[in-house]
Image: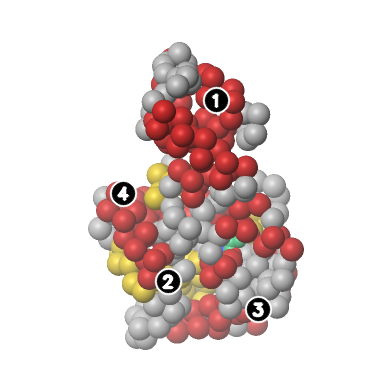
Amino acid sequence: MLHLTILQALNQARQDIEDTDARMLLQSVLNVSHAYLIAHSEHQLTPEQAQSFRLLTIRRVRGEPIAYLIGHREFYGLDFKITPAVLIPRPETELLVDLALEQIPPGHPCRILDLGTGSGAIALTLARHRPLADIVAVDCSADAAAVARINAGRLNVNNVHIIEADWFEGLLGERFDIIVSNPPYVARGDPHLAQGDLRFEPRMALTEGAGSDGLDCIRLIIAAAPCYLIAGGTLLFEHGYDQVEACRDLLGKAGFRKVISRCDLAGIPRVSGGRFGSFPRETARM
Ligand code: GLN
């Protein structure tokens, strides 16, 4: 049997899939870096490696997301294990992390709650950047919570408690300085659900409970958050490209003040939030 070289295998795959996708799949099969592929382009694949690469290429042609095929994705400079049980972390969610970090001065202990943690991308990134924070991360999916726990281990994080729970379930009486969430916000029947990566991502993370306008989970979180925030505590959440006005309105009506929204790199407002209750001077930063 003909042994393909790295270059030949890549050239073959490039006829069917994007160049970067082909490279990432081959790196994953061979467990090597991009630099290795370039430096060893004449290296021969074993028949098993060539076969695995071909199968992954076919799955990619069918539309399966790269992150699920290779099993990981970078977020905020950290590498997260990703399975089809969790949403694939997206660059716009890094904005939510940026905003949350702005609220927490390094060196100050604080309590953070992450609702619908999925892979743990938000909670674990905050934990790495704020080691003194005490973080609770909840997800109603046992499979997602398991992925988040694996990521906590991989990233050596031990200040995040990962709990399988439905939103605020089991947290009565607890108060947090900051609540963050990337909840499901895609409206039922949204045509985007039939396109691209979304076709393969967990419906539970995208649209479950989001209702006909996609805002039901956000409504629930805004309504309940005041019971779980300290006075002057902050709520921050991601929302859809066309939901900023509705979200700001909901925040205002629920009594949140200093409502802010931030745009993603495409200039679309993607994260909103506000502060609830009185504003003690030492936490008045937003
Ligand atoms: N950002 C995702 C998308 O629209 C949705 C994520 C979510 O519902 N939380 O592709």
User: Is 72 located above or below residue 235 in the figure?
Assistant: above
Of callouts 1 and 4, which one flags the residue occurring earlier in the amino acid sequence? 1
Amino acid at circle 4:
Leu
Amino acid at circle 3:
Gly
* Residue corresponding to mark 3: 211
Rendered location of residue 135, percent (x, y) = 34, 65
Amino acid at circle 2:
Ser
Local secondary structure at mark 1: helix
* Residue corresponding to mark 4: 155
Given contact means CB atoms under 8 Å apart, are the residues at marks 4 and 2 in contact? no
Q: Quadrant of ligand 1?
A: bottom right
Of callouts 4 and 2, which one flags the residue occurring earlier in the amino acid sequence? 2
Local secondary structure at mark 2: loop
* Residue corresponding to mark 2: 141
* Residue corresponding to mark 1: 10
Disc 3 to disc 2, C-alpha distance:
19 Å
Disc 1 to disc 2, C-alpha distance:
37 Å
* Label 4 crowd bin: few (<14), some (14–19), many (20+), radius 10 Å: some
